[in-house]
Image (cartoon, rainbow, N blue to C red):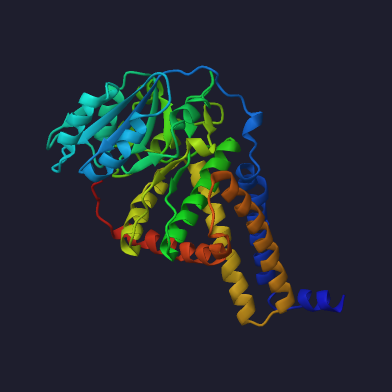
Amino acid sequence: MLWLQGILSSPWIVLIWVLLAALLVQMIYYWFIFSRLAFYNASKRPVSDQKLPVSVVICAKNEYHNLVRFLPLILEQEYPEYEVVVVNDASDDDTFYLLRELTDKYSRLNVVNIHQNLNFFVGKKFPLSIGIRSARYDTVLLTDADCFPAGPHWIEGMQSVFTAKTSIVLGYGAYISQPGLLNKLIRFDTLHVAMQYMSLALAGLPYMGVGRNLAYHRELFFNSGGFMKHYKITSGDDDLFINEVANRKNTRIQTAPEAVTFSKPKQTFGAWFRQKKRHLTTGGFYRPSHKFVLGLFSLSQFVFFGSLIALAILKVDWILLLGIYILRLITQTVIIKKSMIRLGEKNFLLLFPFFEVFLMMINLLLGFTGLFSRKTQW
């Protein structure tokens, strides 16, 4: 009792309450939002028995070395009726000749060649729009040239989630597990982003998807005007479009292991930093409600660690501070571990407390550098 009275009479009581408020917000996010993915039971969700035809759309710019390895894995999926549309966006490597060779071998391969100076949009929105327009079927499944499916049932897994009311399916785009700390950081960051967009989709607030593994109806794309509302923005061919058209009724997620895609992660910190910078440029164009939900979570993180460090420096009761930190850490460990199992990730659980703080600093730095950045091409 004396211990509690000592805390309540502390001159830093306001800062203590700020810390507790930030903790409460974090607990709400983890237990009421992120837990939706962690404890997601796909078996209770309806699936489609119909194997409707699918158009896989891939944009490629100087991707010969990736296409020669990964495109056959997509062309040889075990699915009754599908096509693969590859948009060759003015590549100056051997992509054209490779695709011509593969076209002779695979009848389901549909190649669209775009010549120089025809990209009227910024980034890859124009070639992607051309690819979707060239698609034969209404269900369009997107991935990147440097991605490969987890197995021969990727298309089947993504298509099976579509129902009569579903127009969008958000998949998981993982990165290949490799030795090294950077690889673990990249995979944790990817998991953390998926925890947010998949959990919020399950909560009825879908706000983004990833172009490495994303499906939607071609009709939805054209009825909503495609990328016209944000064609001047370099990024956003995946998240800004989904942010615009997705809602609680037309969007579902797919977490099945066979429906995952894998990509080669960046090999240097600088390359990853530039990639992350490009991805974060679109957040300011989200709907106000989405920016509020995402911003509140980030703010509560900064407030939590800021007030915790400040109180530690001020030598406030260390038992209280340690107890608060451990309570949050236990919550995170449970939710993150379950999410890792759900999405097939491993080997970085013990490092996430350090990665979390590091990514907070990186996101803060990117927020400032974004104010002075130039547009980049894809």
Q: How many marks?
A: 0
Query: Which quarter of the picture shows residue 68?
Result: top left
Residue drawn where x is 66% and y is 43% of the image: 39
Residue 219 location (% of width, % of height): 39, 20
Residue 54 location (% of width, % of height): 39, 22
Is residue 115 rendered to the left or right of residue 11? left
Towards the viewer: 341 or 172: 341
In the figure, 215 relative to 94: above or below? above
Residue 62 location (% of width, % of height): 20, 43
In the figure, 330 relative to 82: above or below? below
Is residue 161 rendered to the left or right of residue 261? right
Residue drawn where x is 24% and y is 54% of the image: 374
Residue drawn where x is 16% and y is 38% of the image: 90
Residue 74 location (% of width, % of height): 36, 32
The residue lying furthest to the right in this view is 1
> Dividing the image into 4 quarters, which one contains the N terminus?
bottom right
The answer, for residue 232, to whether it is visible in the render is no
In the figure, 48 relative to 174: above or below? above
Residue drawn where x is 77% and y is 76% of the image: 7
The answer, for residue 57, to whether it is visible in the render is yes
